[in-house]
Amino acid sequence: MLLDKSLKELLAGYRNKSIDPVDVINEAYAQITKYSTDLNVLISVRDKQEALQQLRSLSPSLPLYGLPYILKDSYSTTELRTTCASKILDNYFPVYDATVHQKLKAAGAILLGKGNMDAWGHGASTENSDFGMGKNPWDPTRVVGGSSGGPAAAVATRMCAFAIGEDTGGSIRNPAAWNNISGLRVTYGRVSRYGCVAYASSMDTVGPLGKTAEDLGVILSVIAGPDKYDATSAPNPVPDYSQLLSKKPQHLKIGIASEMFGPGLDKEISANTKAFADKLSDLGHEIVDISLPIAEISDAAYYILAPSETSSNLSRYDGIRYGNMRELFTQETMRRIMVGTYELSSGYYDAYYRKALKIRTLLIKTFQKAFDKCDVILLPENPIMPPKLGDLISDPLANMLADLYNTPVSLIGSPALVIPSGFHKNGLPIGVQLVGKKFAEELLLALGHEYQQATDWHTRSPKL
Amino acid sequence: MTKTKLITTADIKHLAKLANLPLSPERLTQLASQIETTFEYIQTTQNTDTSKYLETNQVNELSNILREDIVDDSHTFTQEQALQNAKQTHNGYFIVPAILE
Amino acid sequence: MINDLRSTIYHLICGAEIHIELKTKSKMFCGCKNDPFHADKPNIYTCPVCLGMPGALPVPNKKAIEDCILIGLALGCQIAKVSKFDRKHYFYPDLPKGYQISQYDEPFCFGGSVDTSFGPVQITRVHMEEDTAKLQHANITVGADPCVRPMSLIDFNRSGVPLVEIVTEPDIKSPEQAKEFLKKVRDIVRTLGVSDCDMEKGSMRLEANISLAPVGANPCIRPQLPNYKVEVKNINSFRYFANSLTTEFARHSKILDRGETPVQETRGYRADLGTTVSQRVKEDAADYRYFPDPDIPPIVISDEWLSQIKSRLPKLPSAKIDTLIALGISESAAKIIVTNQVMMEYIDQVKTINPKYLESVAKDLVNKKIDPAKLAPSDYIKGLESRLASQISDESVLKPIIEKIIADNPSVVSDFKSGKQNTLGFFVGAVMKATHGQADPGITNKLLHDLLH
């Protein structure tokens, strides 16, 4: 398929006229028509004629000329409604565009649709959606992952050239691993959040999903950077990530923490992660032992901060200026709102919210110590393989534990790259997580790119 | 052995009110057990010694991100745009059943 | 004075909460125009941020923060070195995000004081927050429904306008002190040029927290604060504020006399009734669930920045009065002149020509003997100097004139000796008439004094 090609290949093809962007867009729409409804990948689809008309108005010299993309349905778009996969916003048509969408449009990329998700970001499976549970294209009886399940599936099934998800507690990383694609959680503040419906404001990040680390670098160069409409966006200059990827990272120290390989971790995922480490050794990097005895405590602290912040962020949905009434929140969302309200309420604020903020400091210091000994930390991504549909959403504890390896990174604001690293004997894909110091995206992408040039896990796509 | 509940039905009702969530009694009961599970989970934080740590509110180490006092027309809505998504409006106003004081 | 017999039994204890709308060009957390009062239509100055749309983010207005700090400085406050914004949660249709961005435990300003003739009123804190939308009641039909229903109409032009909140300690002891204090604060803020403080336009709003405590046996020991507090809202003028203190004093005293405690509640002032009425009593105390707003990085006020803000401090009314007094102008004249920009400028000009004439010009301005618009300062001084030049200061010349007037008016002399007022003025007037206004007033007074005694 044309959409099996990398972004750089597509762009080169468009410019030397060996590939017609119309064909690529048509291919994407064909995939959408065939598979989106059954797998519940997209909530809204853009009118094809409108998309093609937009293409015709663009100059081929634009950095992302003609590349079709999917946005998670938590991004404000004037072309399509923005539902956050909730009945509360099923008729909400924004009058303004999210900054990330503005940047992508200005760069010549073309929005094809809005991806299914766990409503409001609440979930790790895309089961908590009012628009149908997202199904895993590798095994449609299982969850696709979440909360950016739709965008991840869209990339895996070639409904787009790349997608933009949103990662608060693992929502880009989790579905990337469960769909055999690459996903990047950026340093907190690296990409503007303006126009991204807030889940947990101190941890929400806007990031790309694609077939390869190289593709992610191409997108990141366009979307990263400060935004005067987002006071938390980082003022750091934006390197040309896609150029820097070709620089082979020299003799990196890769940290592995034995505490992370505890009893809750699926044995094959554990073995796969270790095999990944071996491969990095082969490539000339050094594996070092580090100490990170923090997974459970991070997860618990996350489930104080995230529900607290979401209970606050969802207060604006009162049905007066837009949207529908509050009784339409799902059970899972109501659970998080109520828990968060409790954690912030007088009498409990010190014991819970402030405690979690102190744990965050503890985590920051623990990771700082670990990064004294290494350049990149290697972690498993998901502790389990994707469960059958309906299992995770009905089990709040399992639901929270699914984020075990993701939440530490979320709390400290560091970047993390997830890339395919092999397959389970049940045929489902496995991904690993590479964590860096703040603003080390270029290092992570370069390492991921190096691995992907020496392996081919990432080239496989699901049989549909 | 019965476990002491971390949160009572009265607590849940109070929370639902604070959070402005109109909930039927059935829904409240369903939620109660899920919320109880969550509370047990987050209780583990109480065992961590954080006495030597200050709170970190924000991880981006920024300060004084302010804007100049100028009118920015580029983001201002027209009245029509502002009202566009409201179910009910009246002569340019958003409307809601009167709150009786 | 609380004109109430029971004021010997109870003390009035009152703190004020003053909300001031800043007249910045744009709103507190977005670039929408800040002009709700003059907007000719509702909902024309809104954007994703002040309408609370999904995905919107706040960015604080630097000038608004500086204006708040300026107010704090003018009220004698200390300025925080580090400050932040917090979210204050409650649900109401005029609050689009379901929380108000305000300040909880690290306000910009704290610990100030404002002098009044009844003693100082301590300022607990001065902080920043955003204003809510405006709600208006109307009975209308909605859509296809033919029934007229009571509805609230909401206008978000005001949503997000910068609001400074001044909170005082419960130091206000009387309606008179309240009025003096409120006027002083209003004059200070107007002098700073950061707000019109116009109660009719809503750019200044008042709330009172009132309680009574028994008068202590030892007046040096501040009585323990009472165990209740009544909040009074909907006060639309300084006079109504003062009235509410009087009526609440009476109401609370009656209850306390019975051995009961007034209900802790919020009451609304009713101008038509001249008293307060109970508003709906809330069963639960509000739990605002404050936490630091994660969308807004903290504000660090460096010494440099603070100096810059301080340099914006104009001379405040009291300081201006002191300056004029130091220049030889009487206190009563100074108090009038500082509120009049035209007079102030006139005085400034006279000062540059010749400061020794300031006392005269001040008196003449205040007594409306000269019209500053018609008489240039230099001409005034010329006139004054020629009058002085032809002034008769020679005692040997004045003495016989005065002696003659005294001799010609024996009845007035006996009036003077029996203590009747205005007799001295009669003699001075007569001397001035006899000398065509050229008698030196000082010498005249001295001679009259000597000759009449």
Image (tube, coloured by chain):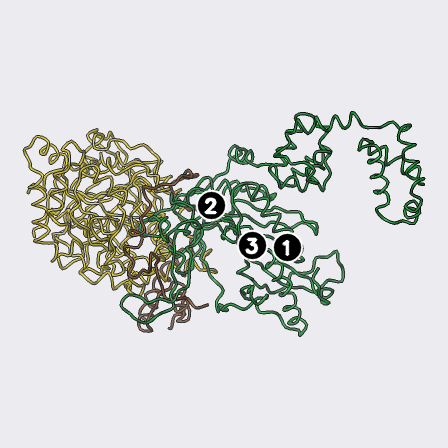
User: Quarter of the image holding residue A238?
Assistant: top left
Q: Colour of chain B?
A: brown
- CA gap, disc 3 and disc 1: 12 Å
Q: Colour of chain C?
A: green
Q: Residue at x 41, y 63 (%)?
A: C137
Which residue carries the number 2 mark?
C84
Foreground pick, C209 / B38: C209
Q: Amino acid at mark 3?
A: Glu
- CA gap, disc 3 and disc 2: 21 Å
Query: Which mark's residue is nearer the viewer, 3 or 2?
Result: 3
Q: Is residue A211 left or right of residue B14?
A: left
User: Quarter of the image holding residue C388?
Assistant: top right
Tags 1 and 2 touching, CB below 8 Å:
no
User: Residue A424, image x and y in percent?
Assistant: 15, 51
The answer to whether residue A306 is visible is: yes
First reached walking from the N terminus: tag 3 or tag 1: 3
